[in-house]
Amino acid sequence: MSEISNLNPKAVWQFFDEICSIPHPSHKEGKLSKHLQEFGKKLGLETLVDEYGNVLIRKPASAGYEKCESLLFQSHIDMVCEKNSDVDFDFDNDGIQPYIDGEWVKAKGTTLGADDGIGVAYQMAILADNSFKHGPIECLFTVDEEVGLLGAHVLKEDWIKSTMLVNLDSEDQGEFCIGCAGGVNTVAKYNQSLQSPAKDYLFMQIKVGGLIGGHSGVDIDKNRGNAIKILAELINRISAEGDVVIASIDGGNLHNAIPREASATIGVEYKIKETARVITNVFIAEKQSELSSDEKLDIELSTTDKAESVFAPAVSKSLIKGLLACPHGVLKMSEDIPGLVETSTNLASVKMIGNEIVIETSQRSSVSAEKENIRKMVYDAFASNGASSVESDEGYPGWKPNVNSKIKNIAVDTYEKLFNVTPNVGAIHAGLECGLIIEKYPELDMISIGPTIIGNHSPAEKVSIPTVEMTWRHVLAIIDTVCNS
């Protein structure tokens, strides 16, 4: 066990430390799913699992409280796997290494997985603690949330018995969520056989870094640089001076993370070698002035070995034009909720897979028609610039706020009594599983809460120690109030 297991509340931190030791990337949460199943059975609790690995554990009411409304807690068990480029780490086999830094818990060079491992830890602590009185409690642990809310997509419609749900996947303590955006992912592909360079090109490698990245919903309005867009802009400027072909290109990793790093190997005519360096230096200065003050754009341009194969000049040009045309960032702010992003899109990753270049994007909006409009914009950006195919997945629905929610009122009242502060209640520009769950259980009354997590989906992720304890106290107060209301 690491040093975090001595923090308070001990049960929550000990369970989180335990979770960190078990690899649980998206699509590969089997070990953690099995661990939770064994955990529930050891406690003698009814434990259900479906074929996808979603787990539901039921804790019966305390004696005399059997007639209380049943309360469901829910979180996802997968984590985003991002690491610094100089860190040697295998997310499939290595345990996350958490450590204390002042009032924060961080991980050594990787994402921490507090999103949503801390939610899982709260649920485990609720199930294991017999020191408080409660009505019937259910704890739902879902898989593959970070890669499209897949576990919630396949959730059985006859599992949940509760009338109220507390989702534990929010990231601002004292900020309660009662609604979220819907989303869709769009993938473009450039499928073209590689060929030997038609000219005697000089090959250069471009590396873009120094950016913060972040969550493509929560952080999309913070003016953070997109490494792929920056890379494409620079290549486009260089190509204005002479022929450029692409030998390789890579950037970003996940559809819901703003890309922090990107790189490409390009072939250029010898005559523009020095011009390319001048263009790059000017470009860095211009771009840095456009970015948020906490980002330090780093671009490296260096000569490299001759590439044996490249994409044809026309394909290389079409790809760069497609990346430039693809929108990224906020398209519209909400007219109903001040400060809330209504519609956005994220140019998330570009990868070479064999002879194919695959580009992933994600679109979000709390308005279904706007979500479709931005999806079409992304489609047109690539379809009109030579993409072999552009396809979108089925997406996921939003969650319409219920201002008369009983669980919302309970959460607000208990928070005010505990901390003498009125919490903020609103919606977020990010996908929550609540949207899919309420589609299957339309009568379920829901709210989302959680401790403060900063930098999630990046190696800068950290969770606030004091707010973890505050949220735990709040969770217990909600249980007590539901039980006695």
Image (tube, rainbow, N blue to C red):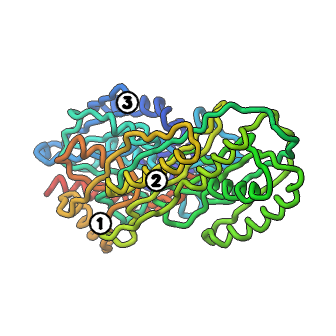
**Taking 274 as reference, is 318 above or below it?**
above
| Quadrant in which residue 127 is drawn | top left
Question: Toward the viewer: 43 or 219?
Answer: 219
| For marks 1 and 3 on the same chain, the one whose residue lies earlier in the sequence | 3
Q: Nearer the viewer, mark 2 or mark 3?
A: 2
Number of the label disc, if any, that sits on residue 272: none
The three-letter amino acid code for the residue at tag 1 is Tyr
| Label 2 Cα neighbours within 10 Å, binned few <14 / some 14-19 / many ≥20 | some
In the rendered image, which residue does mark 2 sit on? 377
Question: Toward the viewer: 429 or 110?
Answer: 429
At a point 37% along the width and 45% down the height, the residue shown is 75
| Quadrant in which residue 386 is drawn | top right
Question: Toward the viewer: 214 or 360?
Answer: 360
Q: How many labels does the image show?
A: 3
In the rendered image, which residue does mark 1 sit on? 415
At a point 22% along the width and 38% down the height, the residue shown is 160
In the rendered image, which residue does mark 3 sit on? 37
